[in-house]
Amino acid sequence: AQKITQTQPGMFVQEKEAVTLDCTYDTSDPSYGLFWYKQPSSGEMIFLIYQGSYDQQNATEGRYSLNFQKARKSANLVISASQLGDSAMYFCAMRELPANNQGGKLIFGQGTELSVKP
Amino acid sequence: EADIYQTPRYLVIGTGKKITLECSQTMGHDKMYWYQQDPGMELHLIHYSYGVNSTEKGDLSSESTVSRIRTEHFPLTLESARPSHTSQYLCASSEFRTNYGYTFGSGTRLTVV
């Protein structure tokens, strides 16, 4: 069964510094997608970045990059130049990709609460 | 500009009442999902649908029920609300392409007193 683990319940980072949020996953399916979402205190889920299991390069989206280490089954999120508005919960998620291309369900890790200090 | 809408945003209701949480999307997505999330905790899938007249239970057991009569509409109903149902409920939808992330609604924060 697929599983996502985020071992950092809370993280602090100084404004303008970089921070890495850890995520490990477990799946027996060779084809899957990895996602990071941001959830501010208002509660909505904001999609940040996606990495496919067959992608050769690490995904990047502006200040967000995903450090994908397939052999270690890790998909850490790196936020560069942290801003006060980055303070939020961050969730790692995975979706298996069945052969019928119907798309598996998205499962989430426990989340990491990031606090950016001025 | 939201493409998936949830109402109400907040709901406080008494024990035993019947409630329906609304979710509608304008993207024509076949797949829709309901997640339950306690404050500061992970999201748990409670229901999903892959199309009209298709509904399945998710990984977390829930006393709620859902229906999918129209592609764009996926309401969740609790026949008799209890304090244990107090939580945030998030609706999401996705295209059939598997490398596409889910689009989430703003959520409904339910409090049962």
Image (tube, coloured by chain):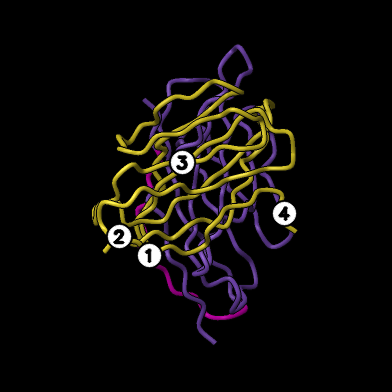
Chain colours: A purple, B yellow
Give the residue type at disc 1.
Val
Question: Helix or strand or loop: what does disc 3 sit on?
Answer: strand
Identified at 52% across, 62% down, the residue is B9
**What amino acid type is highlighted by mark number 4?**
Glu
Whether labels 3 and 4 belong to a single chain: the reply is: no
Task: Tell me which amino acid carries mark 2.
Answer: Val
Rendered location of residue B70, percent (x, y): 64, 30
Disc marking residue B76: 3
Real-space Cα distance between discs 3 and 4?
A: 34 Å
- Chain identifier of the residue bearing label 4 in the image: A
Q: Position of residue A36 (x, y in %)?
A: 56, 49
Q: Are marks 2 and 4 in contact (CB under 8 Å)?
A: no
Q: Earlier in the sequence, mark 1 or mark 3?
A: 1
The disc placed on residue B112 is 2
Secondary structure beneath disc 2? strand
- Marks 1 and 3, how far apart in space? 16 Å
Q: CA distance from mark 1 to mark 2?
A: 6 Å
Q: Chain of mark 3?
A: B
Numbered badge on residue A61: 4
The residue that disc 1 covers is: B12
| Region of the chain picked out in magenta, as a range | A4-16
Question: Does the magenta-highlighted stretch encompass residue A82?
Answer: no
Furthest residue in direction bottom, as rendered: A118
The answer to whether marks 3 and 2 mark residues whose Cβ atoms lie closer than 8 Å is no
Q: In the shown orientation, is residue B105 left or right of residue B89?
A: right
| Magenta residue check for A13 | yes
Under mark 3, the amino acid is: Leu
